[in-house]
Amino acid sequence: MATEVRGDERLIRSLRTKHAELDRLITQEERRPLPDSTRLRDLKARRLALKDRIMRQLGE
């Protein structure tokens, strides 16, 4: 059971790292003179999916 908890913590940490990276990419894209709206939509959808997955993991 302790191994499972550590694995879950590792997964959540990994998901949060990916979420932060998407935040960085979104900010970077938004600061461009002509942001790519399609890319922004994709990045934001991926970020939301990660957030949902993190919340599910925390709820288990």
Image (cartoon, grey):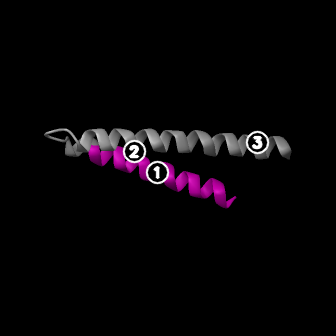
Residue at 14 percent of width and 39 percent of height: 33
For the view shown, which residue lies furthest in the right direction? 1
On the rendered structure, is 46 left or right of 28?
right
Residue at 66 percent of width and 61 percent of height: 59
| Callout 2 secondary element | helix
Which residue in the protein does label 1 denote? 49
Point out the image quarter for the C terminus.
bottom right
Residue 30 location in percent, x, y? 24, 44
Counting other residues with Cα less than 10 Å from the Cα at mark 3, is it few (<14), some (14-19), or many (20 or more)?
Answer: few
User: Is 6 a magenta residue?
Assistant: no
| Callout 3 secondary element | helix
Residue type at mark 3 is: Arg
Which residue in the protein does label 3 denote? 6
For this rendering, which residue is in front, 41 or 23?
23
| Callout 1 secondary element | helix
Which residue in the protein does label 2 denote? 23
Contact, mark 3 vs mark 2 (Cβ under 8 Å): no
Q: Nearer the viewer, mark 3 or mark 2?
A: 2
Residue 25 location in percent, x, y? 35, 38
Disc nearer the start of the sequence (3/2): 3
What segment carries the magenta color?
Answer: 40-60
